Image (spheres, helix red, strand yellow):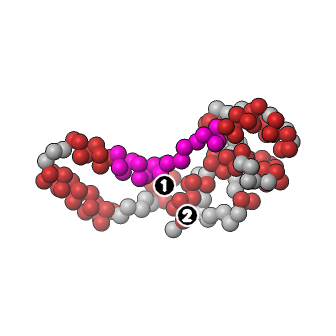
């Protein structure tokens, strides 16, 4: 069940651990040493049992347009490095939202605004319910790889 949510632990998001005060310097050294240049697979086959099993990615710095020069320095000097401080500020200001729930709410709100005919609303909602019964709501592995 939890493997479906493993995208939360993508290499890009695992890179945020580098900016945490709760992660020990030894683990940060390990994350940097194991950093992948390319993204690789973003779907995990099993959930990591600990932080030691996470893999960070340099693509996080490209995507976020953050300077990664601090990675070449000793971890105990990061706290005084401007590029690290900027990354830490970026990480602290990230807003976490549940995209699926937010999207669902937005869709039903748009639907409610677009149709004033109650019979049409009920018909469409029944079509969605039938579609879910027939096709299910869990995406297949090929659909997940497409994403």
Which residue is painted at 43% across and 52% down in the image? 100
Is 95 inside the magenta-drawn segment? yes
- The residue mark sitting in front, 1 or 2, is 2
Packing grade of label 2 (10 A; few <14, some 14-19, many >=20) is few
Residue under label 1, please give it.
144
**Helix, strand or loop for disc 1:** helix
- In terms of sequence position, does the residue under pointer 1 or pointer 2 come before the other? 2
Residue furthest out toward the bottom: 1
CA distance for labels 1 and 2: 12 Å
Location of residue 86 by image quarter: top right
Q: Position of residue 129 (x, y in %)?
A: 27, 61
Mark sitting on residue 133 = none
Q: Position of residue 70 (x, y in %)?
A: 79, 36
Is 60 inside the magenta-drawn segment? no
Q: Is residue 101 above or below residue 88?
A: below
Which residue is painted at 36% across and 51% down in the image? 104
Residue under label 2, please give it.
3
Q: Which residues are magenta?
A: 90-106
Does residue 68 appear in the picture of this structure?
no
Packing grade of label 1 (10 A; few <14, some 14-19, many >=20) is few
Predominant secondary structure, magenta span = helix
Q: Is residue 39 left or right of residue 142?
A: right
Does residue 77 appear in the picture of this structure?
yes
Q: Is residue 68 left or right of residue 143?
A: right
Q: Position of residue 43 (x, y in %)?
A: 57, 56
């Amino acid at each position: 069940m939890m493997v479906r949510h493993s995208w939360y632990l993508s290499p890009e998001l695992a890179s945020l651990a580098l900016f945490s005060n709760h992660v020990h310097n030894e683990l940060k050294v390990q994350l940097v040493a194991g950093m992948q240049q390319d993204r690789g697979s973003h779907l995990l086959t099993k959930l990591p049992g600990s932080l030691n099993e996470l893999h960070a990615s340099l693509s996080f710095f490209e995507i976020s347009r953050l300077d990664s020069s601090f990675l070449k320095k000793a971890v105990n000097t990061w706290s005084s490095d401007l590029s690290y401080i900027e990354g830490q500020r970026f990480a602290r200001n990230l807003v976490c939202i549940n995209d699926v729930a937010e999207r669902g709410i937005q869709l039903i709100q748009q639907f409610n605004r677009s149709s004033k005919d109650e019979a049409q609303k009920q018909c469409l909602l029944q079509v969605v319910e039938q579609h879910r019964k027939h096709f299910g709501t869990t995406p297949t592995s090929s659909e997940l790889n497409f994403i």
